Amino acid sequence: MSGLKKRNSNSSADREEEDKQVMEKMLSQGNDGGKGDSILDGAPGSDASKNPNNNTAAAAEGEGGVALKRTITLVNGVAIIVGTIIGSGIFVTPTGVVKEAGSVGLSLIVWTVCGVFSTVGALCYAELGTTITKSGGDYAYILEVYGSLPAFLKLWIELLIIRPSSQYIVAYVFATYLLKPLFPVCPVPESGAKLVACLCIFLLTFINCYSVKAATRVQDFFAAAKLLALGLIIIIGFVKIGLGDTDGLLPENSFKGSKYEFGSIGLALYSGLFAYGGWNYLNFVTEEMIEPYKNLPRAIIISLPIVTIVYVLTNLAYFTTLSPEQMLNSEAVAVDFGNCYLGPMAWIIPVFVGLSCFGSVNGSLFTSSRLFFVGSREGHLPTLLSMIHPTLLTPLPSLIFTCAMTVLYAFSNDIFSVINFFSFFNWLCIAMAIIGMMWLRYKKPELERPIKVNILLPVSFVLACLFLIIVSFWKTPKECAIGFGIIATGLPVYFIGVWWKNKPKWMLRLIFLTTAFCQKVMEVVP
């Protein structure tokens, strides 16, 4: 909230007087007929929230405020994209594509198409990110084009389910692989894996709270480790091809058993695109990038081809040794592949799987905290989440909040079913953002656009998104209906927390006292 500024006095009496002044200001805002922003700063509808070129990186105004610094370089940006996309899936279960495609050849084509599709989407996001230069990714773009309510519902589902559940799942996979050597002949105990997963999340939250540079260095290191592991698998695959005995890869054999049905192709694309998820994550931290006009598109142009080539060649390497049937029956494809060739060094692959998961959790925590930071700054979340530690210059409250939401999923026993309810939601929001990009071209042609992609790219991408959404409703109508029901739970939260301006004084006082207490405990400022 605008009144909670950095303390300049150590006097107890001065602090009490300052709190009293802030309280009076806040209560007056709550009864001004809705003209102010009540307890929320920067709410949509204000001039600040409507300015697409607002580069403010914190909810701080004036000389006394603090802001997140621009410290993310081109290399850091590439590491965020590569490190977030490449998680555990390509190592553990790259079987969703081959299950639906049915053959080696069609599977490789689907992986390639998914890479090209993701690259097209990322290029559209490069234009969006250099036109609307706020952090926040899809949320910021939907807010700019469609207004407050759709943006809040996007934020609500990201906060409630998508971000914390996906982070916890990857942390759980990391824990499982870390503990597996201790349980070589039996399954890893669930309670032990959950404990280690939570410790992983706590450690990475601490690193992110301590320093942005420390977090980006962790991301750089683990992104390089992932590429090294996949490079090892690819080299082994090429050696195998050079030695021959890979008849299954010959053109006359590679398409045997292909499934060309509309639904099967759609589900194969869904599985492949899920593995490419994260190509838009750099747009969540635009305001912290050094020279975003140059480095955002460069990072995208470098990262997506790398990931596409690595994914296709890794799957090609798998197929040199494992048939589609063997892949479908494997619990961890990369581990089985390593056991065939690495002998006593086969332990390298599980280690690299763990490292890959660790890096993915770090990248997701980093970007998720910025999403909630921006949501708070725009008036959709409590003001505390847009505050920054004045010495560390990190968004401490939003990081702690992200950590807490993620750890809560340790108490869930059916986390995967929750994610299935939102298979359509991600593509719906991405399509809305890119439709918004085309709308801005028409409605606001005067906006600066350092990058302007050919109109055929966003049009074709939106059509492909609609195809994916239709397939999702066709194949999983019940799950989609439940998903819409969960999205609707955000409506009462929006109307009470954001739309309702004239809150009673006792409620404003309670919110103020809670915010002020947490601000003092965390030593953060607006």
Image (spheres, rainbow, N blue to C red):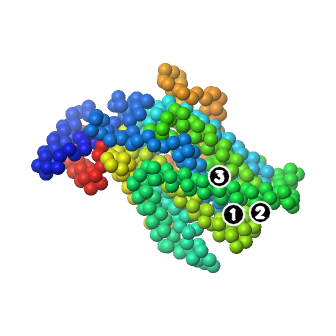
- Residue pointed to by mark 3: 271
Amino acid type of the residue that numbered disc 2 sits on in the rendered structure? Leu
- Residue 365: horizontal and vertical position, in percent? 47, 53
Q: Is mark 2 on a helix, strand or loop?
A: loop
At x 30%, y 49%, the residue is 524
Q: Tell me how many marks there are.
A: 3
| Distance (Cα) linking label 2 and label 3 | 19 Å
Q: Is residue 123 above or below residue 165?
A: above
Q: In which quarter of the image is the C terminus?
A: top left
Q: Is mark 1 on a helix, strand or loop?
A: helix
Mark 3 or mark 1, which is nearer to you? 1
- Residue pointed to by mark 2: 322
Q: How crowded is mark 2: few (under 14 residues within 10 Å), some or many (20 or more)?
A: some
Q: Is mark 3 on a helix, strand or loop?
A: helix
For marks 2 and 1 on the same chain, the one whose residue lies earlier in the sequence: 2
- Residue pointed to by mark 1: 333
